[in-house]
Image (spheres, helix red, strand yellow):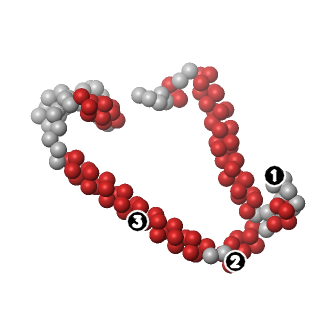
Amino acid sequence: MFPTPVQKAAPWVRHAYTIILPIALIVWLLPLIGVAITSIRPSGDLAAGNYFGMPSRFAGIENYTAVFRDSPIGWYILNSFKVTIPTVIGAVGLACLSGFRAGGLQVPRQSPDLLPVRRRQLHSVPDPDGAGARHDAEGGAV
């Protein structure tokens, strides 16, 4: 099954995986770490061009208090809800409608356009008997 579990890979692949994965995670999280550190810097550090050095002092409480006190963040959050809630309701509603409609379709058993979907479904379900064969409701092999 793709992807092959790393436990089944060659020893050098497992070793490379244990080295490369943490490095990739750190590189992936660098922008988030940078934003978090910038959010606790005093504004004087940013004005002086100290973007990547250590903050001269911790100003996190001042900065976050200023955000909630001096900006209309409540309106921004409300606007996010106004956009997100109808979008989620619409997407879930359309998915339910299409699923209901697709459930009532009469599809030929060996339709060539559905074979990849059917194979994917069969291989994604674990076989509790370990026999490797799947059976339909009548007991015949699928």
95 horizontally vs 15: left or right: left
- Three-letter amino acid code at the position of disc 2: Asp
- Three-letter amino acid code at the position of disc 1: Phe
Q: Kindly indicate whether the residue at mark 3 contacts the one at mark 2 (C-beta within 8 angstroms).
A: no
Q: Which residue is label 1 attached to? A: 52
Q: Kindly indicate whether the residue at mark 2 contacts the one at mark 1 (C-beta within 8 angstroms).
A: no
Is any atom of residue 22 visible in this view?
Answer: no
Q: Position of residue 135 (x, y in %)?
A: 19, 31
Q: Which residue is label 2 attached to? A: 70
Is any atom of residue 41 visible in this view?
Answer: yes
Residue visible at 68% across and 78% down in the picture: 69
Residue visible at 46% across and 64% down in the picture: 84
Tag 1 secondary structure: loop
Tag 2 secondary structure: helix
Front-most of residues 42 and 123 = 42
Residue visible at 22% across and 47% down in the picture: 102
Asked if residue 98 is positioned above or below residue 10 in the image, the reply reads below
Residue visible at 14% across and 32% down in the picture: 139
Q: Kindly indicate whether the residue at mark 3 contacts the one at mark 1 (C-beta within 8 angstroms).
A: no
Front-most of residues 31 and 82 = 82
Q: Which mark is residue 86?
A: 3
Asked if residue 27 is positioned above or below residue 123 in the image, the reply reads below
**How far is mark 2 from mark 3, CA to CA?**
29 Å
Q: Which mark is residue 137?
A: none
Q: Position of residue 49 (x, y in %)?
A: 85, 57
Q: Position of residue 46 (x, y in %)?
A: 82, 61
- Three-letter amino acid code at the position of disc 3: Pro
